[in-house]
Structure formats: structure tokens, C-alpha cells
Amino acid sequence: MKNFILILSILAFIIWPLNFFRANPQLNLEPQTIFVQDYQGRQLILRNINLYPNVYLARLFQNKAVIVTNKYFNNLFNILDLNYYFFGSHPREVVGGLNYTRLPLLTILPILWFLFITQHPKKKTFLLSISIFILIISFFINHYVYDFILWPFFLLFIFYGLEDLIKINLNFSTIFSFCLLIETIYELAHLIS
Amino acid sequence: MKKYLILIVALILGSILRLWQLSAVPNGLTWDEAAIGYNAYSILKTGRDEHGAFLPVVFKSFGDYKPGAYIYLTVPSVAIFGLNEFAVRFPSALAGILGILGIYLLTKTILSLGSKTTSTELPSQLSALAFAISPWSVHFSHGAWEVNVFSTLTIFALYYLLRFIRNKSSLYPSLLFACLSLAMYQAAKLLTPLVFLLFVAIYWKDFWQEFSKYLNPGKLLRLAPFILFGAWIFFGSLFGSAGNRLSTLSIFNYKPNLAEKALPIDGVGSLAIPLFHNQTELSTSLVLSRYMWHFSPEVLFYEGSIITERGHIPGLGILNPLEFILLTFGFIWLVRQLAPGTHDSPSKSTLLILGLLLIAPVPASLTLAEFSTVRALFMAVPLAMISGIGMYYLLRLLRLMVLPLFLLYFLLVFYVFDSYFLHSQTAFSTEYNYGYKQVVEIIKENPTKRVIFTDVFGQPYIYYLFYTAFDPKTYQASDGFVDGGLDVGKVNKLANVEFRQFSSPEIMTEKDTLFVGSEGNINNQFDITSPNIALFRQFQTPDNHIIFRVIKTKP
């Protein structure tokens, strides 16, 4: 049973790397950080400054740091969005980004199950590690190029989540695994076609 | 008294936030608000709507067929306060305040049904507090949003349903609130049955035990009016002209003909076309991605809806950013009740609250809009419950950390509402059609033979009717409404006012005429010092964007 779960998890997960290498064959890892000069961002700040009643308030809320923090939070929330993984960021695709389906939708159940319910001895380590990686790659405008750092975690989440689900309800998990297998085959066929 | 201190604070704070600057924030009126106000005024004066229909249940309005309940709620408000912004928004604000009490009652009942060991009073009062200061709820209480009243009615419908299940009330109050909710809001036709089904399914045994007492001719006869009214409202909005509006908004009518577009890439006879580029796959993925988008932290806590600023506090998400922590803790507390080993069976209260959260975005996911804070407003109800539970859990877990955390939270609450009441007018001015009121004042102060009013911002006639409190009987008799087919219609002429586009040369030739136009109609090159110009006025948004230019020509 464990082997079946492992194969199913790998099959479901493999869509992400396949899409990654297909969309980014040269694997250009040149970093573009949120700290690069941004003319448009500065213009926006200058425009917004006029909306404040005095210069002190304007400086407090509209300054150069705001350009950087806004970009950081944009990236962070993009990575935290479930649609980033399951629907290629739709409906908020990143312009020029890698907007592809990373995981089959049904893997959401084992992932959330693992994140919220499974009692695993290394769960805290996993969560802390993935959080740190997410916080780091959010510094890059092209964070979608570096999201391969998250691959092992998602593979583990799917695997441990499925394993735990099977322990709890074998009948449901069998039907669910079958559905996941069908969706995975469909997504893989879509990818190859 | 002391026992209910948090609830009393929540009610006072919630009332202040919902009633303070009710007419001024947002600084204008949406088309629907103006239409609701004028139709209520028309009903008050003549018993008929703007089109002359006698006490209709569904109002034709612009051709968008508004459910009538909110308009009837506005009638007494208009009678007391007059035809103005406050009167139009007051029913919604009141519903928001009552919603705070409703959240307390519903959370308490849900939690007391789910577990006998957990304290119910404190988390319920904290949920009411979370709802009272929810930016989402406060914002929608500051506008004539039918969905806000619908949410409160549904809260009470569910509360009385749970009381019925516990044999503490009859079924009638629950059915009454459910029927009113159906009459209140279009999406209720889907949401109300779904939440009722959830509650009935989870408590099926208890429900059936109580419901079986109603299976006698006398009681069934008393249920009949509710069932007939519900069915009438339900089916009335699915078919006919009202149904057209529903199909215009539906995501299932988005058919870009994928197969044809994929043909040059995949080639004729390719198996990929029917397999991967079909309408079913597209519709399914659009619905699912829209549904998931409602749980995006970006929308909830950071930037809000991407489409329009009308549905949230500009520059902020639809929730308080720090509510993220409360929701996480609330979620952990709830999920722990579901976790195997902690209980013999999953906690029903958890299933109910999480079920409500999962059902709430369903109607919004079936429409063309990618995210609608309006259609998804009912999410604020389970989210407030989870936040309240999160506060309670935090209080138990981190006693020492609670004070600084709550201080930070309330500091952020202050920041959020400071942004809303004092700094949001620049963004709201275009979203809420700021300027119409000022322009109509100019029309009233400067009587001319003709008025030519631009229709570039849509439905100017309703603002003219609203701000002049135009005699409904005269308007009904003129009936200048032109149907728009599947889309909304328009009025081209009303008394001496024409609603249409015009250009600068027309101003030079027409005498004794008041022209109300946008920057496009009266551009910067127009010579306002020309001898036939008697008056020139310009109206700008708070961030200095020109909305209207008014020119009066000499007789």
C-alpha cells in the first residue's frame, strides 16, 4: 500500500517539474530582486504624496520603502495563494511569469489534511522550513523560477497526507486515490499533447 | 450585565461604525442605491414603482429586476428621513447592527449543540465583536446592499432552525426569515437552500424527529403559505425577464468556442480538441478557480478585489490584516474537534461552521466576475465566528502574549477605519458616482429651456429623479424607459432633460440650454469665455480628476 501511495504521490507531483522544465527550458536563474530601481513605482509614490494633508503624513505612508514592501507582499501572497498551485495563478496571472498548473486539484485534500490534521513527528520542521523558503523566494520578482525549492515539501505533504487519510478511512481513501489517479493521468496527457 | 459586557461593547461599537457618516461615506450613490431610493419614494407616494407596476415583488428598475424586499424596507426609512442617502442606507446599517446580535445567538447555539464541555458564552461574544469590527461587514452596512440584509436574515433563519431542531421553537420563524431572504437577494435562491440543506443534513435525525410532528393536515396547511411564497420567488427569478438577467451574469454562458480556436494548433481530427479544449473543462476550471480565489490571502488580507474598489476599503483587503492570526487559531481549534482520536465523532459545530464557510462563496463562483465581495459577503459570517473562536483560543493558550497582541490588533482596527472614514473618498468618488448630486443641484438652481445631460456614466435619469425628488406620478405617466433586451435599459428624455452625448459645437449653437458633460464632451480646448456662455462650473473628485463640466448658454 505504501508503494502505491508513493507512486501516486510522485505521479501527481511530477506535473510540476515537467511543466517547469517545459516552460523554462534554459532554466535562467538570474535573480531579479524586489530592490531593483523602479521608475513607475516612484512616480506612483510621488502622485500619492499629493493626497495627504501634510508632508509628515505623506512621508510616513508614501516612501521608498513602500515600493519594496509592496512588491514583497505581492510576491508572498502570490505564493500563498492556492490558485498559484492548482490553476496557474488564475485569475491573477503574473505578467511574464510561469502561469501553469503545478499540481492536480485533488491533491489539495492530502495537502490540507497534512497541514491541519496529521500528527507527524517532523511536521513542525517541515512547516518551519517551507515557511523560511517561501519568505526568502518572495524577495525575487521572478520567484516562480525558484519555486522548485518547494518541490520536496509538496511531495512529502501529498505522501504523508495520503498515508494518513488511508489510515483513517480505507474505503474513502481508495475511491479518492482512484479519482486522483484519473485526474493525474488526464493532466499528464494534457501536458504531453 | 457584566456577563454580556463584550456583547454590549460589540453592539455599541458596531452601531457607531455603521451609523457614523452613513450618508457621507462612501461619498456618492451607486446606480442601484439611487434606484432603490426612488422606487421606495414612488411606492410611498403612489403605491407603484417607477414603471407604474402596483406593489411589485420584483422591481424592473433598469431592467435588472431587483428583488423587492429591500425597496419595501426603505419605504418607512424614506418616510421618516426623506429621500436622501441616509434613508436609502439605513435599512442596511440596521441589518448590520442586528447581524452582530444574530452572530452571537447563532454561534452560541452552534457551539452548545456541538459540545457540552466547551464554554460557549465567551467565544460567541467574541464572534459578535469580530463581526462588529469586520471591515467587510461595516463597509457593506454603509450602502444599500441587499446582500447585507440577506446575510442577517439568513443568520436568524439558521438560528431559529437550530432552535427548532432543539425543540425550543416552531419551524415558522425560521421559514419566515428564509422566505424573506429569498425575496431580498438574487443569489439567495442558491445560498439559502444550500445552508438549510447543510444544517438539516448534519442534524438529520433531530430534524426529522421534530419535523415529523408537522406531518398532519392542520400543520401542513400552515406551512403551505411559506412553501408557496418561497416557490413563487424562487421560480419567478429563474424564468422570464428576470431569468434573462441571471443568464447574462452566469459563467456558464461564457462560451469562447475553444474547439475552433484550438483547430489551427492541434489540427483537424486531433483527439486533444474534444479531450482538453472543451466547454465542460473550461467551465469547470473557471468555476473552481473562482471558488478557490475566495480563500486567497491576497484578497482577504492584503489588496482586496482586483476588479473594483467598490467592494472593499481601498488599498486594503476585505478583512483586518491581523485577523489572519485569529482565523488561523480559530481554524486550528475547529479542526482539532474534527481530528481523529480527540472525539468519538467529528464535532457537529465544527462541521456547521466550516460547512458555512465552504458554501458561502458558491453563488459568487458561478458568475462572470472573478471575485465579487458583494456576492461573497455571507463569508463574513463564518469568518467572524472563526475569528471569535480564534480570539478565545488565543486567550486560553497565550495568556501573557494576549494583551500586546490584542493591542496591536485594535491599533490595526483603528488604522483600517481611519483609512475607511477619512482616506477612502478618492477611490470611492469614481466608484460611487460622486458628482451627480452637485450637478443636479446646479440644474435646480439654474432653470433653462432645455438640459442636455451626458449618459456616459450610465443611468443619469435615476440621479435626476432621486435628487430632485421628481413627482413619481408624473414620471410614471411619461414612461420614457427604453428596454435594453438582455442588458439594462435607459431613459433618453425626462421632462426638459435629455440624456445623451453631445459635442462642443452643439453648445455654441443651442440657446438657453444647460449642458452637463464629462471632460470628453466639454474638452480643455473649449472657449468658456465665449459671449454665449452664461455659466461654467467644473466638478472634481477629491484627487482632482474632472468628473463633470457644466455650461449654461444665454437665452
Image: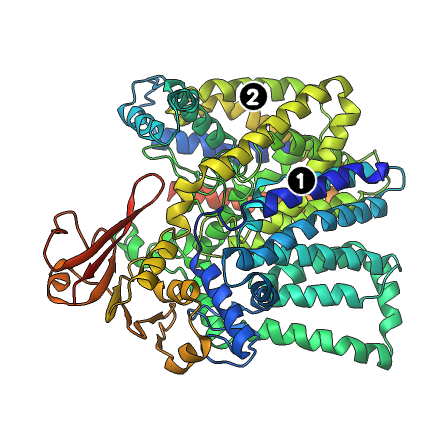
Please name the residue shown 85% across and 81% down the image: B217
The disc at residue B479 is: none
Vertical side of B154 occupied by A91: above or below: above
At which x and y percent is residue A118? 71, 30
Res B191 → quadrant: bottom right
Residue at which label 1 appears:
B13
Q: Which residue is mark 2?
A: A130
**What secondary structure is found at the residue carrying circle 2?**
helix
Same chain for labels 2 and 1? Say yes or no: no
- The quarter of the picture where the N terminus of chain A appears is top right
| Figure quadrant of residue B462 | bottom left
Q: What chain does mark 1 sit on?
A: B
Q: Residues within 10 Å of mark 2 (few under 14, many from 20)?
A: some
Helix, strand or loop status at disc 1? helix
Residues A144 and B39: in front is B39
Q: Amino acid at mark 2?
A: Ile
Residue drawn at x 10%, y 57% is B531
